[in-house]
Each structure stands twice: as C-alpha cells, then as structure tokens.
C-alpha cells in the first residue's frame, strides 16, 4: 500500500487535468484515513471550499469539488464510486451524472468539469492542497 | 369529402368504437376536417371489452372493461348518445329515427349493430332466471341470480358457452353444459379433439351433456326449473343461460330494404359498403361473401376498410379473415387453425393423442404434403403461433411435419418456425393488426422489451395470444440490429438481476466484494452496487450500514432519509396503516418546529418533514424514537406504505378491520428490500376507499374474507391490480403475499415494478396464480420461509445508526468542521420554509440557517 497517493491521472488526460488542478496552494490536514470508510467519500471544508474526498480500493485517494453543477447542490461526496470502462467515477446522488475522479470531467456532459485537488496520505492522515 | 359531412354511427360496441378510433386517428380534429359525427349506443355505457367479459365475474368492474379513454367522446365534432336506439332508417331522406321519435340526418351511415344471442325456441325460455350472455347488464343479472341458486345450466357448448360455464362454476354452482351437437366447440374442434376437451372440462367438475335437444322448460321438483329433452329425459336447475350462438342484428337493414346475405347479415362489398353506397356495415352484423365473422379482429378490419373508403381511399379492402382461434377455457388450452376439420379435397392429417394428460393435437396438410392447411390443439397449445403463421403465410412445411406437434424428445430440437422465414407483412397480432415489419421498426426505434413493444405498437394488448411470437420476433430483430439480447445488469456483471440473486443465494455470498470477485469485473458502479445491496438485503437482511455494505447504498439508503434537490433530507416517521395517536402527532409537530422543518401530509398517509441537514438527522431520529416512532422508508427500493381506509371499526359500510390488517402488514413487510418500491392498500369494503387496486398488493374485505389483488400501479402508467385469490382468511392472505413478494424479488429485473414485471411475465396472470396460489413450482414453503427470515431479522435501521458511534459519526456535513452546508438556505412561503431558488440565493433574501445542533 503506497503512502503517497496523488490524484491518479491517466496519460491521455494528464494535460487537461493539469489545467483544472490547482497549480499551487496550501496543504491542509483534513481528517484521518479511518474517517473515510472504504469506497465512500466525505466532504471537507477547506478555506471556505467544499472538497469531496474519496477513498477507493487500496486506499487510493481522490479530491474533487463537492458542488454538482447539474443539481446546484453540494452532494458529490455522497455519491457512489466505481468505474465506467475502467475510468474511476463518482455518480452524483441527485441526477446521477458521472464525474471522472481523476479529471473532474462529467461523462454525460464533457463541457462540464469539476475542479480536482492534489491529495495525499501522510502517516494515516489525509492532506489536501487547496 | 364535401363541406360538413354528417356521419352517424349506429352501435357503440367494440367494432363501432374501433371505427371511431380509426376516424379520429385520421382526423384528430374532426370539426376542422368538417366532419360532424354522432355515435348512437343502445346500452347505458360506452364501448367495453366484450372479449374479456367473463373477467367481470372474477372481479373486473365495468370501468375496468371500458375501452374508451377518458374524454375520447368529448371532442369537437363528435357526439356520443347512450341509451339511444334506432327504430328506422329512411334511406331516401337520409334520416334515422330513434325510438324516442327524434330524427337525425346523415350523409354517411355506419351500421355497427353487432349481434344478439340466439335463443332456441323452447317453451318456457322466458321464465325467470333464464339469461343470455352478452352485455354487462346480463352479467349483473346472472350474478344476482347466482346468489340464490345452487345449480346452473348453460345451453350451448361453444366458445362462449364454456366461458359462461366457468363463470357459473366460479359462483359455486353445480354447473352443467347442454349441447345440441354431439361434441363441444363443434365449429372449431374435430371429434377426437372434442372428446379430449370434454374429459378435461369434466375433470374440472362441470357436467357435460351432448346431443341434447331441449324441448321445454317447466317447473322443477328439486330446483326452480326442469329442462325436458327430446328423449323425455330431464335435468333440474335453478338458473339457465342461453349461449347457443349469435345472430346478426340486421333488422334495420332488412326493414329499409338493404341487401341481406344468404345466411343473414347485412351484405357488404370489399369496402364494407352495403347495397346502398351511403351506408356501411361493419362487425358481426355484416355479411361478406355470405360469410359472417363472430370474432373481433375481422370486425376491426372492416372498420379500418370503411374508414379508409370514407376518406376516399380504395387501396384497402376487406378480404375475409383468418378465423384461427386460441383461448384458455377453464385453464384448458384450446386452439383451432385454418381448415381444422380437414375439409380440403385430398388433405391428410397427423394426430397425436395423450389420454393420460388429456392432450390432443392434429395438423392437416395439403395433398402434396408441402403446405399446412389447419390444426387443432387441445390441452396444450404451445405450437399455435407457429402453426397459425405457417398456415396464413402459406409457408413450406418442414421435413417430417409430425414433429411440429410431437412432444420434444431428448436431444431433438423441435422444428420451430424460424421467425426469419416470416414475411414482413405477416400479421402477428390480428386483434390490433400489427405485422412483423412494424415490430421490426419498433425495435429499431429502441423498444427492446415486450412491455415497450406492447405500448408502442399495441401488439399483444387485446387477447394476448401473440405475445410469445411477438417476443421471438423482437429478439430476432435485436440480434439482426447487432443489439445484444441480454439483460445484463451493467458492464461489471454479465448477469441479470435475477441471475445475481440466484448466485447470492446458492453460493451463500454475503458481500459485494465476494460477488464481484467471483462473478464480475472492475470496481462496480452506481447501478450494480445498489442492486447487489438490495439482493443481499432480500436474502440475508443484515444492517444496511454495516461497513462492507454501506458503500453500496444509494444516498437515501446511506443516510436513511430522502435526499431533496438542495442536498437536504426529509424524514418521514412510519405510521403503519396511517394510524397515529394525538401524542404522536404532537411529538412530530414539536420536532418539526424545533428543527424548523417544512411539513406536509403525503399521498401515503404520513407526515413528511423536509429541510433537515445531514448532521441533524441522528438528533431528529433520536427524538422520534423517544416519542415511539421509527423513521420510515419513504425512500429505497422497499415497502413504502400500507394505505388503509378506516374500516369496519368506525365505518358504517365496512365489513372488516382494514386498519388492523394494514398495521399488521406494514409491520410485517417493513424494511423488505425489493427490485423496486412496493406499495400496499387495504380496503374494508368494495367501496375501495384505500384504492387498493392501484397498488402492488391490494386487499379488499368481503363478507367472507379478503380478496387479494396484485401488480397494480399508479404513477406514470397506471395499471389496475388483478385479482388472484378471493375470500382468503387473514392468515392465508399473508401466506400468499409472502409467496408473491418473494417470487417477485427472486425473478424481477432491476427497477421493475410489479406491474411491468407482470406484463413481461410469460404465461401472464394464469402462470402467476399457478405459482403463488396453486404452488405449481413447489416453491411455496420455501418462499414463505425466506420471507419469515427477512421478517425475523428486521431491525430499526435508524435506532441502530444512532446507537453506533462509528455509524453516527458519518452524519455530518464536513469531516473537519461542525458547520452546516451554507448552500442549504430557505425562504418563507405560506408560513413555512422552502428551499431558496438560485436567484433568491444570489439576492440573499434568505432566512439564516440554524446554529448547528451539536
């Protein structure tokens, strides 16, 4: 199990992902890994921003905006995670749009993409850069 | 058509109404098309489904049988007059006169007067408690007489006569059928078939008397009537129903001098025109080439032809009809195709008889052995679709045609009808005239389930006999279009929900990871995870927020409440049967007030409290639990509510305690996870105030128990529930519901309500009855035991959640803050809160959110 997990970015989308991922920012410790049950998400309030953080298999972590533009509600962290064609996604609980966890791109509406954030596991604590 | 054509349609039966539907299809705005149409119906109600008339005895109401969509006759340019009978046609003046002496001018007249039951001229046939079988009024009178009778006789052993016999038997009467001919269903069935049919019918407790000519009906010694036969033998009975064939209603035509067919009926040409070209005749009153058609499909065909001709089209003509029939009489399959009697010169037949199971099958082939001419099937009519299409489409017979009707032996595939061999013009559904090509188009347009095909083409929606064949054609088309004919749940599992359920049960799988590891691939998704959670819950019923189950749940199940559009939740305390104490109501009011929640009484007889944030939920539940409530499943694919009327406890009409039963049922099935949501209704009498017939499971009290209805639905596509058992004791009703629900849970697809499940169930209602009531699969005890397991393992999910610190911790907006979501904001409307709109949020005209409730 790796101790340092950045938002996993596949090669093909690496370029796009770099644009939407905050280039710089402050790292914040938000919770213990144990606060996030496997294969679920939580929401962290970081500098006034709502960031959804997901813990997938093998403690792979992802951080993405909690705001779902399709429903105008802060609900992404409560979505079900999984994969579509191998790409890890979260499904918004309101209208069930899927967002790619690595890029924030909405699968059903590719013009829309959520901000993603660097996230790390340090000594059992979850850190996110906002 | 010239300016303002006046059309008068005489008769509002099935065919008369179908004519109007066709006319409206052509001219959705009749008035704009300069048409002024008057429809005259002599019965007190508009058109109803006479084909399924006998279902009136098994609980269908006149409304259920109605064929008229609400508002159909309320359009401009169209008038329907009921209780209106025409007494005279003046062809020279183009005027019809009604029995009340009003007159009505016409430019075009359409006669759809139907037929009357034939009553043999027997002395005493007008005695009391002698009936015919044609209208709803006839059936109402029979039902009333049945209540004071012990025995009943049906005169006539044809198709309608046997249906009628079933009705009498179901009323609990000692039932006899008296037939003039030497066998039953003499028109459709040959002698050997008649013998098998007779022994099947007698097995069911109906006495059959053939070659009996009734000469007189007189007073009986042990019953109301004595029927005396030509050989001076006699039979005593309390009521008599004449169902000895029909005669065309052609008296208006005769009197006004129209040409009449050789055997009666209004003579028509290929355009359904009578000898007066301003008068059309359609349906059972018409005679084409001296032939009359007592089935609905040819009548519809005539209606279409007449309609086209009125519009000036001459391409469509009536060319006779295939009189093949398939039906189920008292559970016995009876089918007849084409030249069933083998009257064609030089024809030869193959026959198969099984006297153990009472099955008889015969095919008639042409002299050269190349073509199928006809068939008779008794006891099992599985091959009907194949044989009928082969005959009608003149298709080449396979080698060894006997295998078409022989039971399949091991390893030997039965020669089916390759549906690919059918031409696109082959009519699959003759009731609604849907051909193979149209099914193909529907599939290409994306209709890939039999339910979808039914609703867009109407195929299989009348008698339903063509459904297996239509399904076959649909699947073949899907393959042709490169669609995979599968109901795989999603990309992660190459199985249907039903198959996954089976795997979980047989292999004793208890977690999603195990299921995925053994039978799936990838990580899963928002389709398969909740489905697996539901299946695991139906089988094992573990706490749904156990660590390895929690991540599978939809947000509503995950947070045990209903998520609303702004991400807040609503809480709906369970009120079994809608019963609540004043203290309970006060407690709910106080809680709603304390947390500033919006309250509304729901359609499911509960109080819904809206606007709770995640972190407030455990506190709200705690207070509800203290007041004696559990929160309820107003969400999830589970039992929602059991709606009830007040019942015999208070109501002066109630015959049983509907509230008591509703409370018992809701407490029994609460928490049950299913393929989709389930709703119940319990009514204390036939007034049906709880609308139980619109529910998945409905119970209606009778004088002697409970009638059980299943597979009803409100919502987007309402469907009346169907009666599957009558006069059950409370205990038996619960056993049958156990079986029904578990059978549904085992076999339904994901998100398939009981109504769609039922529409897609091969074998339909009869099959469902067989499985649930007659236990034909021998599953009854197992299904009941499984339900008992689920019931025994029920737990108050909300209580478990608030008492488990690990679980409770998850109920917060932020993992690192006690703040609430500042996007959940409210404004006031009608003295309560509601979510602010995006615009309102921008203008900040909002009520500040509450301080956190920690």
Image (cartoon, grey):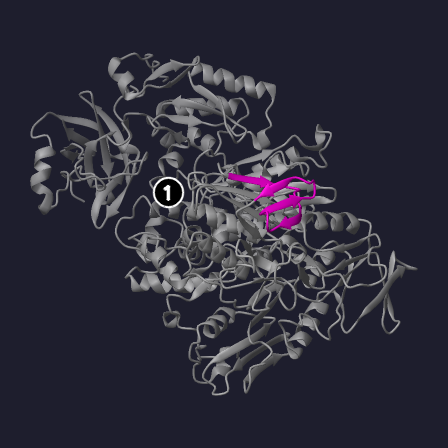
> Which residue is at the far right?
B221
Foreground pick, B331 / B408? B331
Q: Label 1, secondary structure: give it.
A: helix
Compared across the picture, whether B719 is left or right of A53 comes to: right
Disc 1 target residue? B549
Residue B854 vs B516, above or below: the answer is above
**Quarter where residue A82 is shown:** top left
Foreground pick, B733 / B511? B733
Q: In what quadrant of the picture does the C terminus of chain B appear? A: top left
Foreground pick, B742 / B328? B328
Q: Is residue B147 visible?
A: yes
* x, y percent for residue B482: 28, 61
* x, y percent for residue B374: 54, 76
Magenta-highlighted residues: B78-105
> Which residue is at the far front?
B92
Residue B691 vs B191, above or below: the answer is above
Residue A123 vs B250, above or below: the answer is above
Badge 1 local density, few (<14 within 10 Å), some, or many (20+)? many
**Quarter where residue B448 is shown:** bottom left
């Amino acid at each position: 199990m790796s101790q340092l997990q950045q938002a996993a970015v596949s090669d093909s989308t690496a370029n796009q992902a770099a644009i939407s991922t905050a280039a710089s920012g402050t790292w914040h410790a938000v919770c213990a890994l144990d606060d996030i049950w496997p294969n679920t998400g939580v929401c962290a309030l970081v500098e006034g921003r709502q960031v959804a953080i997901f813990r997938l298999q093998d403690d792979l972590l992802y951080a993405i905006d909690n705001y779902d533009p399709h429903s105008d509600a802060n609900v992404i962290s409560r979505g079900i995670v999984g994969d579509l064609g191998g790409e890890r996604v979260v499904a918004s609980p309101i209208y069930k749009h899927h967002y790619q966890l690595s890029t924030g791109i909405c699968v059903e509406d590719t013009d829309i993409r959520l901000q993603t954030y660097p996230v790390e596991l340090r000594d059992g604590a979850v850190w996110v850069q906002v | 058509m010239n300016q303002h054509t006046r059309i008068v349609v005489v008769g509002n039966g099935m065919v008369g109404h179908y004519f109007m539907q066709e006319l409206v299809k052509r001219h959705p705005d009749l008035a704009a098309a300069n048409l002024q149409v008057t429809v005259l119906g002599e019965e007190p109600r508009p058109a109803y489904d006479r084909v399924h008339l006998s279902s009136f005895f098994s609980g269908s109401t006149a409304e259920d049988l109605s064929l008229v969509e609400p508002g159909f006759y309320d359009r401009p340019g169209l008038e329907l007059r009921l209780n209106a009978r025409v007494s005279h046609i003046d062809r020279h003046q183009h005027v019809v006169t009604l029995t009340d002496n009003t007159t009505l001018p016409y430019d075009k007249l359409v006669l759809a007067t139907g037929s009357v039951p034939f009553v043999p001229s027997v002395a005493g046939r007008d005695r009391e408690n002698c009936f015919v079988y044609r209208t709803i009024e006839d059936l109402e009178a029979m039902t009333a007489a049945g209540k004071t009778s012990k025995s009943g006789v049906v005169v006539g052993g044809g198709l309608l006569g046997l249906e009628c016999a079933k009705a009498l038997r179901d009323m609990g009467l000692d039932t006899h059928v008296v037939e003039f001919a030497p066998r039953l269903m003499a028109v459709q069935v040959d002698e050997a078939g008649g013998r098998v049919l007779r022994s099947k019918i007698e097995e069911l407790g109906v006495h059959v008397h053939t070659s009996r000519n009734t000469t007189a009906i007189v007073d009986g010694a042990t019953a109301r009537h004595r029927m005396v036969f030509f050989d001076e033998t006699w039979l005593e009975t309390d009521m008599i129903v004449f169902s000895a064939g029909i005669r065309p209603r052609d008296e208006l035509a005769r009197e006004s001098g129209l040409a009449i067919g050789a055997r009666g009926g209004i003579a028509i040409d290929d355009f359904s025109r009578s000898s007066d070209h301003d008068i059309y005749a359609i349906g059972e009153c018409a005679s084409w080439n001296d032939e009359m058609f007592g089935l609905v499909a040819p009548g519809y065909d005539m209606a279409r032809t007449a309609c086209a001709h009125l519009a000036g089209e001459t391409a469509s003509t009536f060319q006779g009809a295939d009189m093949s029939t398939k039906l189920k009489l008292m559970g016995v399959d009876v089918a007849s195709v084409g030249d069933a009697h083998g009257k064609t010169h030089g024809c030869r037949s193959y026959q198969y008889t099984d006297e153990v199971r009472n099955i008889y099958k015969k095919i008639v082939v042409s002299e050269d052995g190349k073509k199928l001419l006809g068939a008779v099937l008794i006891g099992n009519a599985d091959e009907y679709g194949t044989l009928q299409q082969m005959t009608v489409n003149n298709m080449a017979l396979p080698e060894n045609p006997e295998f078409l009707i022989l039971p399949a032996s091991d390893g030997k595939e039965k020669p089916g009808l390759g549906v690919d061999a059918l031409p696109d013009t082959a009519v699959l559904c003759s009731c609604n005239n849907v051909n193979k090509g149209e099914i193909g188009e529907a599939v290409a347009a994306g209709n890939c389930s039999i339910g979808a095909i039914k609703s867009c083409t109407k195929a299989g929606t009348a008698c339903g006999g063509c459904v297996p064949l239509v399904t076959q054609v649909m699947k073949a088309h899907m393959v042709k279009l490169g669609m995979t004919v599968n109901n795989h749940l999603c990309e992660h599992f190459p199985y249907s929900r039903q198959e996954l359920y089976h795997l979980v049960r047989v292999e004793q799988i208890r977690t999603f990871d195990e299921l995925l590891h053994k039978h799936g691939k990838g990580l899963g998704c928002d389709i398969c995870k909740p489905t697996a959670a539901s299946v695991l819950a139906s089988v094992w019923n573990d706490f749904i927020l156990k660590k390895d189950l929690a991540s599978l749940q939809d947000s509503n199940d995950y947070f045990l409440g209903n998520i609303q559009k702004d991400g807040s939740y609503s809480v709906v305390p369970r009120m079994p049967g809608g019963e609540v104490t004043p203290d309970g109501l006060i407690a709910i009011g106080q809680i709603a007030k304390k947390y500033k929640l919006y309250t509304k009484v729901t359609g499911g007889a509960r109080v819904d409290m809206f606007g709770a944030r995640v972190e407030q939920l455990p506190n709200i539940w705690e207070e509800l639990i203290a007041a004696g409530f559990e929160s309820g499943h107003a969400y999830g694919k589970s039992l929602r509510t059991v709606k009830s009327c007040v019942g015999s406890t208070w109501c002066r009409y109630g015959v049983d305690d509907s509230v008591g039963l509703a409370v018992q049922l809701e407490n029994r099935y609460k928490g049950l996870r299913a393929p989709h949501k389930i709703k119940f209704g319990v009514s204390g009498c036939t007034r049906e105030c709880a609308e139980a017939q619109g529910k998945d499971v409905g119970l209606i009290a009778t004088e002697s128990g409970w009638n059980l209805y299943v597979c009803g639905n409100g919502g987007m596509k309402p469907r009346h529930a169907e009666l599957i058992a009558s006069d059950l004791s409370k205990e038996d009703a619960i056993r049958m519901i156990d079986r029904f629900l578990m059978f549904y849970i085992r076999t339904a697809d994901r998100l398939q309500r009981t109504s769609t499940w039922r529409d897609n169930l091969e074998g339909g209602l009869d099959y469902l009855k067989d499985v649930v009531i007659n236990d034909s699969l021998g599953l009854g005890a197992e299904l009941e035991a499984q339900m008992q397991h689920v019931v025994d393992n029920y737990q108050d999910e909300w209580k478990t959640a608030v008492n488990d610190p690990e679980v409770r911790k998850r109920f917060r907006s932020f993992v690192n803050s006690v703040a609430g979501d500042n996007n959940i904001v409210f404004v006031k409307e009608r003295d309560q809160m509601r979510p602010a709109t995006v615009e309102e949020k921008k203008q900040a005209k909002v009520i500040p959110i509450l301080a956190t409730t920690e």
